[in-house]
Image: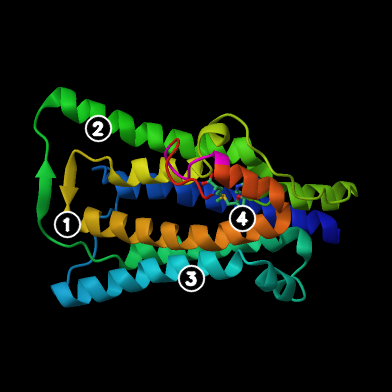
Amino acid sequence: MGRLLLMLVSLTFYTAAVAALLFLIGWVGAFDFMPLTVDKGREGPLATALLVNVGLIALFGVQHTVMARPTFKEAWTKVIPAPVERSFYLLATVLVLGALFHYWHPIEGTIWSIQNEAARTAIWAVFWLGWAILLLSTFLLNHFELFGLQQAWHNLTGKNASPPQMRTPLFYKLVRHPLYTGFFLGLWATPDMTYSHAFMAAGFTIYIVIGIAYEERDLLDVFGQEYAEYRKRVGAFLPGIGKVP
Ligand SMILES: C[S@@+](CC[C@H](N)C(=O)[O-])C[C@H]1O[C@@H](n2cnc3c(N)ncnc32)[C@H](O)[C@@H]1O
């Protein structure tokens, strides 16, 4: 029963995470049908908007950076069962994203607004390509492990947790962080760039660049020389750029 309950917890948090990801795409894309977007939300003076928005992005950054560290996981799994540790990480992500959507203060003003229809279509294509790369990258690594289902399933079926494996399929042969490359494309590719959108995209870009240093330090600890060689050979976000000799 306990194992089944953990599986149900994992499935529930997985569903919430997928819903939050879909909402994030609509929120960033600022589509008309969305109730809240990066350009539609609370009103307030500019100083309040800047302070609140920086706080929201920092909250996302701190949650992701702290909860992904092995030392945190070690302490955290003394409180919650190990098979749902990743699921609780996702739950925290959903809550932080919920706060972002709910409390974001749009900033007035437009930086660019492309009028040419063909150019708009091309930019939207890049937007969707970015999110597709992000999603596909989760499957290239191990979607069900990244989203916590595999751990609970192994626990339910009595299978031992498999040791972490370094993976470099497809996009990972070209760049070390294709998921983040996809995220950058999704964040920045818009035909209507408002100050609000640019502020949000810049905030997440800064967080990712900082977060990568921690992620790669952990990857070096886990995969050692294999990852060090990979960093020498393969660029970070764009092919050939950002190799670490
Ligand atoms: C959100 S994913 C992002 C992966 C990668 N930074 C990217 O942008 O494609 C983060 C998880 O992927 C794992 N990871 C990153 N690169 C990996 C690789 N080449 N093989 C296996 N796991 C990897 C990290 O340990 C971390 O748990």
**Nearest-to-viewer mark from 1 and 4:** 1
Name the dominant secondary structure of the magenta segment: loop
Of label 1 and label 4, which has the lower sequence position?
4
Q: Which region is colored magenta?
A: 233-238
Is residue 187 found inside the magenta-colored segment of the image? no
Q: Is the CB of the residue bearing disc 2 within 8 angstroms of ligand 1? A: no
Of label 1 and label 3, which has the lower sequence position?
3
x, y (%) of residue 242?
A: 44, 46
Compute the Cα span from label 1 to label 3: 24 Å
- For the residue pair 122 and 25, the one nearer the viewer reads as 122
Q: Is residue 31 above or below residue 210?
A: above
- Compared across the picture, whether 9 is left or right of 174 comes to right
Which disc number belongs to residue 152? none
Q: Would you name the residue on which mark 2 appears? A: 123
| Label 1–label 3 contact, CB within 8 A | no
Q: Would you name the residue on which mark 1 appears? A: 195
Which disc number belongs to residue 13? 4
Of label 4 and label 3, which has the lower sequence position?
4
Which disc number belongs to residue 62? 3
Identify which amino acid the numbered label 1 is placed on: Tyr
Residue 165 sits in quarter: top right
**Nearest-to-viewer mark from 2 and 4:** 2
Compute the Cα span from label 3 to label 2: 31 Å
Q: Is residue 235 above or below residue 224?
A: above
Identify which amino acid the numbered label 3 is placed on: Val
- Please, what secondary structure does the residue beneath circle 3 have? helix
Is residue 236 found inside the magenta-colored segment of the image? yes
